[in-house]
Image (tube, rainbow, N blue to C red):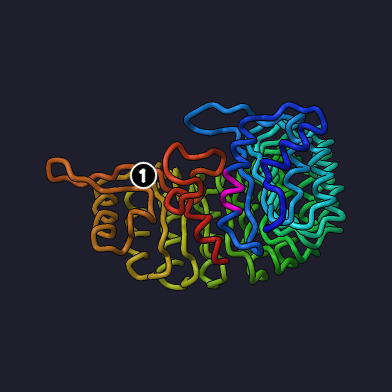
Amino acid sequence: MAGLPSLEESYSAICSEMGLLRNPYIMEKLRLTDKDAAQTSSDVGVTVKIPGNTPIVPVPRVTDSDIVALAQAVNNTFVTGLDLRFNQLTDLGSQHLANLLKETVALRYLNLMCNDIGPQGAEMIAKALHRNETLKRLQLTGNKIGNIGAMSLASMLQINNCLEDLDVSDCDVDTQSLVAFATVLTWNKSLRIINLNRPLLFSQQEETTVHMAQMLKMNQHLIELHLGKHDMKDFGVERLSEALTFNFTLRYLDLRCNKITRDGAKCLSEYLKNNRPLEILDLTSNRIEDDGAIYLSEAISLFNTNLKALAITSNNITGKGLVALAEAMKINSSLSYIYIWGNKLDEPTCVAFSEMISCGRLPEEHTDVSPYVVDGQVYLAELSHGLRKHYYWTPSFGPDGDPVANSALALSAGM
């Protein structure tokens, strides 16, 4: 980094040259980045973080006019990450980011979560990635790129062999886009993580789930797959479970907010009995109930030694199922994280989990409940812990990406 102008100096000079107003918030963040860069070895690089959702003091958000100078300033060999989440970038700003992606020799991480980028902006970014050989992680969460933008990104994956992590959740992708992603991922060998949560689906036939299942039979490179809010039912889970028996790489499966019942949980339990590499299973906000929890507990206690984290929050499970899972954890030492809040926490459940926490089998950092006693009776209080608690916002306290509140980040880091 020696001999290179600071980011703050570069930004100021470019603004002066182009007759643009300097954004004081950007100046402050670049100044902090320069300090970090001074303490970082040249082969590591730094991430420029300019989020627009600071929890305490409102800040001027980055706009399209700001990004003109910023994109040129960060086109620097020691800047490897750019975090612009929760700002006001539109398709016009995407053009400047696309130019950056065409020219950069160092940028590996780009976070554009919850801006105002539309289909044309996503298309420009996708075309830029045709020739980009550095970017590893792209987050477009919450941008309404629709079918056109998603299809452009799917086409990009046929050409780009560098991108490893793509997040297009809450982007209004539809059936055609999901089928395209499934088709491309059948042969893509570089992408390891994809988030397809909350598409806009209008069919009840679960065609997209079937296509994803067919993809998982062939793909042996994907390690993390998010299919939350897909309106998935037991039929779809059965197809996924059957396909996963042929897959030896997937370690994180997110099926939150679907319509999975005990029959779907039974299919998943049969898959877990095969002791595949799956380490994280998220079934938050389904309806597996006691029978489903018992099916899972049988697989965990008798057959599976790889699963590390299980989220069954809000699944209408009573003490019968929750106690069965607690007993399974006493036998299985591999399952270290379990999240149960939102179910019916009766007295047997409270006692069972209180005993596991007090004896050290289940640290409070690895679950979302904490025991307390009133008049000799044990109760459980909710903790702000989970697999992805702070996925869409910056926490109001503690560090962003705290492994306690967001254990999926800590677990997936070793994958």
Residue 19 x, y percent position in the rendering: 80, 27
Q: Quadrant of residue 80?
A: bottom right
48 vs 269, left or right, is right
Residue located beneath label 1 in the image: 383
- Within the magenta stretch, is there residue 89? no
Residue 311 x, y percent position in the rendering: 47, 52
75 vs 195, left or right, is right
**On screen, residue 215 above or below 96:** below
* Extreme residue in the front direction: 3
Q: Visible in this render: residue 39?
A: yes
Dot 1: what SS?
Answer: loop
**Which amino acid, by three-letter code, is at mark 1?**
Leu
> Which image quadrant: the C terminus?
bottom right
Q: Residue at x 70, y 47 (%)?
A: 206
Dot 1, crowdedness within 10 Å: few (<14), some or many (≥20)?
A: some
Q: Main secondary structure of the magenta part?
A: helix
Residue 153 x, y percent position in the rendering: 81, 48
For the magenta stretch, what is the residue range?
Answer: 32-37
